[in-house]
Image: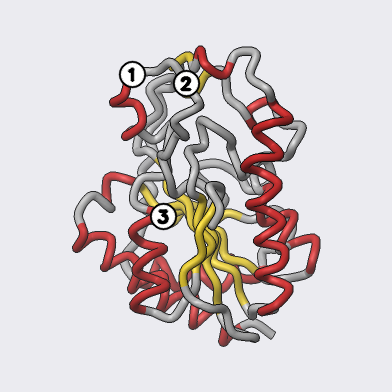
Amino acid sequence: MSEAFRQLGTPSPGGIVCTADHASNHVPADIALGIPAHLLGEHIAVDIGTEAIAEHLARDHAIPAHIAAVSRLVCDLNREETAPGLVPEASDGHPIPGNVGADREARLSRFHRPYHSALDQWLAAAEPKLILSLHSFTPRLASRDEPRPWQVGVLYNTDDRAARIAIPLLEAEGLNVGDNLPYSGRDLNYTMNRHAEAAGRPYLGIELRQDLMQTPADQARYAAILADIAQRVASALT
């Protein structure tokens, strides 16, 4: 057991696996963030809906999942160790006073490094055909007045092999698809840069809009869509 992550299912060589870096809003009892409790249910603390979808993928679609077990407000697992936002002092206009002056090295040792070391080992043992990187985004940021009409975003940095296959498949599902939107994988892609791009492993970076994943039925539906798309992408990869 680890307080940084949990794993569901057993990867098989040449199969598909899922990662969910921001799936949890858990804050350990010995860490005081100093924020109102309701913010732990907001997008600044967790990628809403991703935990349930990752569980569906592992349980119902044979896509094992490596799932974060701590809030991004405690330690953002999808940031470089040197990134200022790794232990955020503010997020989307909300101050996080408990992180001001926090022991950054302790957070890295306790959460970030165990999460990524375990993911290294997990992927090396399986050598999957495709990694499905699962995130979600808020329809509107509080600190920025910009519409986000996309229902799903496909993110990538330099390796767009899976993205190029997936985007038309997602559009054929009737979805409004953002190509490296609502933000770019060239700017924020640490987990996939490290575990996919650096190792030559194809990956499909997915961002789902959070207002579309509110109910268990919504979550099951999107898990089924993503499982189907991921399988078709994996089959099409050369």
Q: CB of mark 2 within 8 Å of CB of mark 1? A: no
The percent position of residue 163, horizontal first and vertical second, equals: 58, 65
Foreground residue among 81 and 187:
81
Q: Name the residue under label 2.
A: 33
Mark closer to the chain start, 2 or 3 = 2
**In the rendered image, which quarter is residue 223 located in?**
bottom left
Q: Which of marks 1 and 3 is in front?
A: 1
| Colouring | secondary structure
Q: What residue do we see at 21% from left, 59% from top? A: 216
Q: Which amino acid does label 2 sit on?
A: Leu
Q: Do the residues labelled 1 and 3 touch (CB within 8 Å)?
A: no
What separation in Å lies between label 2 and label 1 (alpha carbons)?
A: 9 Å
Residue 169 occupies quadrant: bottom left
Q: Is mark 3 on a helix, strand or loop?
A: strand
Q: How far apart are marks 2 and 3 (CA)?
A: 31 Å
* Callout 3 amino acid: Val
Image quadrant holding the C terminus, namely: bottom right
Q: Give the left or right position of residue 15, taking residue 112 as reference.
A: left
Q: Residue 36 carries which label?
A: 1
Can you see residue 46?
yes
- In the rendered image, which residue does mark 3 sit on? 152
Q: Where is residue 17? Give x, y as percent.
A: 55, 72
Percent x, y for residue 151?
36, 52
State which tag comes first along the sequence, 1 or 3. Answer: 1
69 w.r.t. 129: above or below: above
Look at the numbered disc 2 and give the secondary structure of its residue.
loop
Badge 2 local density, few (<14 within 10 Å), some, or many (20+)? Answer: some
Say how many tags the image has.
3
Residue 179 visible in the picture: no
